[in-house]
Amino acid sequence: MIRFEAFGKSYDGHVAVRGLTLEVEAGEVVALLGPNGSGKTTCLKAAAGLIHPTSGRVTVDGRSAMEPAARRTISFLPQKVAFPDALTGREVVEFYRRLRGGARGRSDEVLRFASLNGASRRAVSTYSGGMVQRLGLAVAALPDAPVLLLDEPTAALDPEGLSAFYALTERRRGEGKTVLFTSHHLGDVERLATRFAVLVGGALAGVLTAAELSERLAQRGVLRLRLDRLPEGLLAALRPLSPGASIRGDELLLPGPASLRPALLDAVRASGAEVRSLSADEGRLDALYAEMVNARQ
Amino acid sequence: MKGAFLLCARQELLLAVRSRWTQIFAFVFAGLSLAVSASGYALSGGHGIQDFARTSASLVQLVLLLVPLSALLIGVLSLAPERGAAELLFSQPLGRPVILLGQVAGLWAALTAAQAIGFGAAGVVVFSNAGGEGLAGFLVLFAGSSVLTAVFLGIAALLSAGAVGRRRARALALALVVWFIAVVLFDVAALGLASLLRSGTASRVLIVSVLVNPVGALRTGALLALQGTTAFGSASLAFLRFTKGTVGAGLLLGGSLLLWTVVPLALATRRLSRADI
């Protein structure tokens, strides 16, 4: 649905994205992750037909993203969306509804969805930052476009806006629509994305599916045990199951996936030790993300 | 396509009508137009309201000063919006030229309406006090003012096309430079240059100066329509001698203003289509 083919973009000699090849299939929800300045926004803007590639090409539904016909298939929410202060929220939504040829009642639906129906007749100049972002979300939700492009959609959202954003993305995912979004909030990413692409310094540092991510995170779990005593040979007995098994203070640390934990506990009990307390740390996306970024940098 | 053009035009008209800058321009232009219609005789030692012919002649300078300035500044402010607004607008399934031309059309309608308030107010006062003689010339000046608005909106579009979503301050600064050159510096420079040259070459410089500067073209055209050659300066006189009559002069001046309307807009659409937003 969205295809970056050796896509590169430079601004005044500064390379923002270099040779990115990435395909987002119909029905996927893909999160673009990366530190500031890693080229995420440039990628989204290229898919929205706002910037010309310096090298390679970007297509949406088989057409160059620069063609107006390709933009018929997308709906884009910019990072810092802005609207003319002199217009009311309803006037903004009505303008974009007419541009996209939406049904007359659609404006009311999206204003309600963005919890702005009470403020829709107020000038945008009176809106808070969160309300402006919700208005942007309402405009993005207007067309029933097959592709939704969202650039840090949750950055300035209040709780009502967050709830609307999750509802929109989950509904689009349920309808088999394609969503490509950037976010620094890894909670959003874990909740919504079916695939994750990490960009560092304008280049792709890695791509993981949700299943691959779960597996990688599971590998990073740690079982923490406090025992009444530490029988001799226990560590040696546990290491075939958890090679990183170690003792820190009075805790026995057993890294490994959650699926191995029953076997580890059986091995501990078999040694004659009694478990006094038990806790588990699960692998976290932020740690994995930081590791991928650091490895690339 | 036509629907999208009209939508963009209507939206820009609505925004321009609500813009404080347009309102200030309409207010100032109307106030000065009324003042001109009432004070022309006072300046020459008389009193009372002027007739249309004298009011029009007095209004020419006001039009040449204020209309380019308002079109350039309001044009750049409107056509180079904030980045987030521009990104959302230009990600819609429309060609960039359609959006730009629609916006320019809306701005032109708003600024022409603002001028109509000034011309209308002055016209009502003059008509009720001095009758309708010279009304045709007054209307020609209004039409010329509207054409000058289109010319400088086109130039504003060209300046803004590379500044959409960024560098708006630079585009505004450039707009002021363009205004200063077109309205103030150009004539002075042309006359200064002509004074240094031999008669034949000097005439050619002055003729060209009338045609290549839209402000000069409108000034010459308006004065020709209003007062014949009696109010002409040296550049306009040289130009009229060259065209050998008012018909030829009118055609050349009309052609110059038409080119000044079309060419900057064409360049602006081309520049915008190639720009990164």
Image: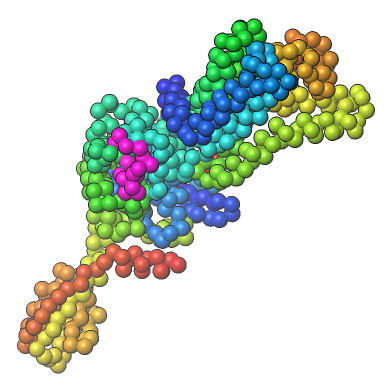
> In the image shown, does A202 or B68 lie closer to the viewer?
B68
Residue in the image at 57% along x and 36% along y: B73
Residue in the image at 31% along x and 68% along y: A287
Quarter assignment of residue A134:
top left
Q: Is residue B143 left or right of residue A131?
A: right
Q: Position of residue A88 (x, y in %)?
A: 35, 35
Q: How many marks?
A: 0
Task: Check the image and name the residue furthest to the bottom.
Answer: A232
Quarter assignment of residue B128:
top right
Q: Position of residue B258 (x, y in %)?
A: 65, 20
Q: Quadrant of the C terminus of chain A?
A: bottom left
The answer to whether residue A159 is above or below residue B229 is below
Colour scheme in the image? Answer: rainbow
Q: Is residue B175 left or right of residue A162?
A: right
Residue in the image at 59% along x and 33% along y: B72
Q: Position of residue A202 (x, y in %)?
A: 47, 57
Span of residues in magenta: A120-135
Q: Quadrant of the N terminus of chain A?
A: top left
Q: Position of residue A102 (x, y in %)?
A: 31, 28
Q: Is residue B257 left or right of residue A250?
A: right
Asked whether residue A203 is in view, the answer is no
Residue in the image at 45% along x and 54% along y: A39
In the image, is residue A127 part of the stretch drawn in magenta?
yes
The answer to whether residue A251 is above or below residue B160 is below
Asked whether residue A231 is in view, the answer is yes
> In the image shown, does B185 or A59 lie closer to the viewer?
B185
Query: What secondary structure prevails in the magenta region?
Result: helix
In the image, is residue A277 part of the stretch drawn in magenta?
no
